[in-house]
C-alpha cells in the first residue's frame, strides 16, 4: 500500500522520534534512511520548521519533497528573534531592511500568490505587520504604502 506522509520538521534536525517516527513506523521504508535524507535536504534551513512530504511505495522506496518554511519562520530567522509581539501594533520586536525583505520574498516566491518580487515583498510585509516587525524603521503598513507609491521600485525590480 503506497502512501504519502506530510510533516513539519526542524531543518537539519529530524530524528526517528515524533512526529516522523510514529508516521513512518507502520510503512515499509527504512526510517533511518528517510531521516538522514531529510536532514541532508533541510540542512540549509537550520532549525526552522520545514514542511516535508514523503511518498513511499510498497517495496520500501521513497521520495522526499522539501517545501519552503512558513513566511513567519523566515522572518524570525532573518531578523533574529524567537517570538512575535503580543501587541504587534504597539510593541515591535525587530526591524528588517528592504534587502532582507527582498531576500525573504524571493525565498517564498514559489509559495506566494504574487507574480513579481515587488508584490511578494508586500505579502511578506503583511506577515511582518502581524509579528510586530518594522521595515526600514517604519511600520510595515507604511512600508507597503511606500512600495505602492513607487519609492522602492528600483530595489524590488526584477533581476
Image: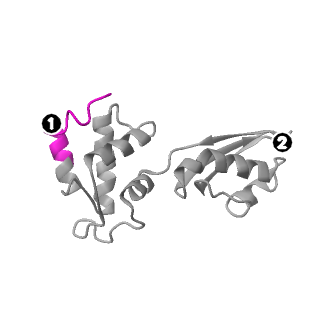
Sort mark 2 into few (<14), some (14-19) or many (20+) by Cα contacts within 10 Å.
few
> Which of pointers 1 and 2 indicates the residue nearer the eye?
1
Q: What element carries label 1?
A: loop
Sort mark 1 into few (<14), some (14-19) or many (20+) by Cα contacts within 10 Å.
few
Residue 123, horizontal then vertical, whole percent? 32, 45
Relative vertical location of residue 102 with respect to residue 72 in this rendering, above or below = above
- Residue 5 visible somewhere in the drawing: no
> Which numbered disc covers residue 10?
none
- Residue 68 visible somewhere in the drawing: yes
Query: Which residue lies at the image location 83% right of the left edge and 42% below the top edge?
Result: 60
Residue 83, horizontal then vertical, whole percent? 40, 68
- Magenta highlight: main SS: loop
Q: Nearer the viewer, residue 126 or 158?
A: 158
What's the image's color scheme?
one colour
Query: Which residue lies at the image location 24% right of the left edge and 37% below the top edge?
Result: 155
- Give residue 138's quadrant in the image: bottom left
- Give residue 90's quadrant in the image: bottom left
The Cα–Cα distance between marks 1 and 2, rounded to whole angstroms, is 54 Å
Q: Horizontal placement of 39 versus 156: left or right?
A: right
Query: Which residue lies at the image location 72% right of the left edge and 50% below the top edge?
Result: 36
Q: Which residue is the site of mark 1? A: 150
In magenta, the rendered stretch is 144-159
> Which numbered disc covers residue 60?
2
Relative vertical location of residue 69 with respect to residue 87 in this rendering, above or below = above
Q: Which of 27 and 134 is in front in this view?
A: 134
- Give residue 128's quadrant in the image: bottom left
Q: Residue furthest top?
A: 159
Residue 13, horizontal then vertical, whole percent? 63, 58
Amino acid at each position: 500500500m503506497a502512501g504519502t506522509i506530510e510533516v513539519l520538521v526542524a531543518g537539519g534536525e529530524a530524528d526517528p522520534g515524533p512526529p516522523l517516527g510514529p508516521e513512518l513506523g507502520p510503512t515499509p521504508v527504512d526510517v533511518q534512511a528517510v531521516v538522514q535524507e531529510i536532514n541532508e535536504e533541510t540542512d540549509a534551513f537550520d532549525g526552522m520548521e520545514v514542511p516535508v512530504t514523503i511518498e513511499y511505495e510498497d517495496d520500501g522506496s521513497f521520495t522526499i519533497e522539501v517545501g519552503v518554511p512558513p513566511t513567519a519562520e523566515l522572518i524570525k530567522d532573518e531578523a533574529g528573534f524567537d517570538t512575535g509581539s503580543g501587541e504587534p501594533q504597539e510593541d515591535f520586536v525587530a526591524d528588517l531592511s528592504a534587502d532582507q525583505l527582498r531576500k525573504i520574498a524571493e525565498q517564498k516566491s514559489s509559495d506566494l500568490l504574487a507574480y513579481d518580487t515587488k508584490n511578494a515583498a508586500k505579502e511578506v510585509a503583511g506577515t511582518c505587520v502581524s509579528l510586530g516587525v518594522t521595515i526600514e524603521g517604519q511600520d510595515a503598513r507604511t512600508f507597503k504604502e511606500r512600495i505602492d507609491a513607487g519609492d522602492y521600485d528600483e530595489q524590488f525590480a526584477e533581476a
